Image (cartoon, rainbow, N blue to C red):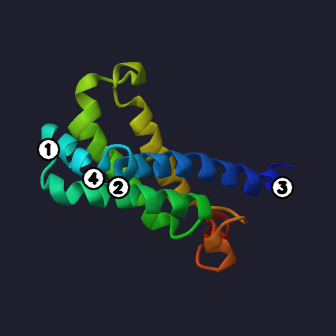
Amino acid sequence: MVDQARPVVLLLARIAIGVIFLVHGYQKFATMGIAGTTKFFESVGIPLAGVAAPAVAVLEVAGGLALILGAALPIAGTLLALNMIGAIVFVHGANGFGAGEGGYEFVLALAAASLAIGFTGGGALSLDRVLGRRRTAESISA
């Protein structure tokens, strides 16, 4: 039964985490705007804020879509995790662990989920699998 549920569970996890990234990236374009995001990045000391702001916005939108579709998962998972590590270093780390206090708890969970999805594969219902580009952990060890 677990094997039958695995593709659906992986799909749901990819969609949930992907939507979070997609929405946050979209907010950087539509709500805050790239100028506002750049200003915020400058205020927290992110180097090259004028380059980092649009790059992060694009990464979060494209990476979120990649997770949802199950495409290029090792690349998307790694880049999104690195993005979240940057968020911990520059924004959330000083606030401690608690998510309610602006801490890094939620951001750390997103980083871990991104890596887990990226390196365990998206399952049978992923674009990588359909296109034959991603082997699962089971097929690698067999």
Q: Quadrant of the C terminus?
A: bottom right
- Would you say 53 lies left or right of 106 here? left
Nearest to the observer: residue 17 or residue 10: 17
Identify the amino acid type marked 3.
Gln
Residue at the spot 67% in from the left edge and 65% down from the top edge: 138
The residue that disc 3 covers is: 4
Disc 4 and disc 1 in contact, CB within 8 angstroms: no
Closer to the eye: label 4 or 1? 4
**CA distance separating discs 1 and 3:** 48 Å
Query: Which one is earlier in the sequence, the residue at label 3 or at label 4?
Result: 3
Q: Which comes sooner in the sequence, label 4 or label 1?
A: 4
Q: Which of the labelled discs sits on residue 57, or is there none?
A: 2
Picture quadrant of residue 108: top left
Along the line of sight, the residue nearer the viewer: 4 or 138: 4
Label 2 is placed on what type of residue?
A: Ala
Q: Residue at x 80, y 55 (%)?
A: 3
